[in-house]
Image (cartoon, rainbow, N blue to C red):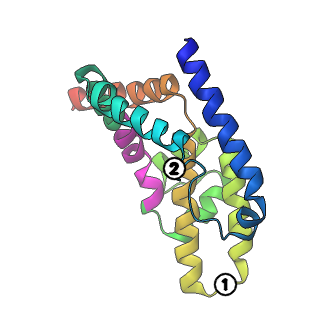
Amino acid sequence: MYLRLNIISKLASYSSHRFIKHLAEIYAGSFNSALLEDKSDEHHLLEVLKGVAYKHVFTHPEVEQLELEAYRIISDLLNFYRPLLLMPRPDFTQLYQNKYHKKYFIETRLLHKLSTKHCLAYGEGIEVICTTHETEKDILEFYYRARLIQDYISGMTDHYAYQEYRKFAVKIKNVMLLN
């Protein structure tokens, strides 16, 4: 524990000093490297730690199994929300504004599951594109809609994502068994 705290303290201190030293360049957008991406001792320490982590931690069978399970959960969650992406823009807009559309029974329910915070961010993005050309409007609206779903899923805790995945997966499995 002492080693870990000492390393973190050393790297954080070095990073903050480097940030302050190059603040003008960072603010101007001309600082084109990571704060620990130089030839310093701190950079070499970080590289050694990355090598050890990759060789002994990230390639451990239990860790790889967890990553594969997480990949499956995230992939399936994205797939569950896919119907929202398949909707034409005018229909999704109407669904978003009214929160109900007779033709889109499943999509309505999926939209209701999304958080208010993410829906508000989508709405703010859409307000900006009102004056753009129709083709660009379609592209930008689809981008914001994809971000709505992506941000919602990426904001889930591991536990919540697993619970949502299980709810969807169990329900789908039960429906398939009934048919």
Looking at the image, is 85 positioned above or below residue 41?
below
Q: Is mark 1 on a helix, strand or loop?
A: loop
**x, y (%) of residue 93?**
62, 64
Between disc 1 and disc 2, the foreground one is 2
Report the residue that reaches farthest toward the bottom: 133
Q: Quadrant of residue 11?
A: top right
| Residue at the image position 60 percent from the left and 57 percent from the top | 95
- At label 2, counting other C-alpha atoms closer than 10 Å, the crowd grade (few under 14, some 14-19, many 20 or more) is some
| Nearest to the observer: residue 128 or residue 20 | 20
Q: Residue 112 appears at what percent x and percent y?
A: 60, 42
Q: In this view, does 12 lie above or below 142?
A: above
Range of magenta residues: 73-85
Which quadrant is the N terminus positioned in? top right
Q: In this view, does 49 lie to the left or right of 9?
A: left
Residue type at mark 1? Thr
Which residue is located at x 66 percent, y 71 percent? 30
Q: Disc 1 versus disc 2: distance between alpha carbons? A: 24 Å
Q: Residues within 10 Å of mark 1 (few under 14, many from 20)?
A: few
- Secondary structure type for disc 2: helix
SS majority, magenta: helix
Residue identifier under label 1: 132
Q: Which mark is residue 150?
A: 2
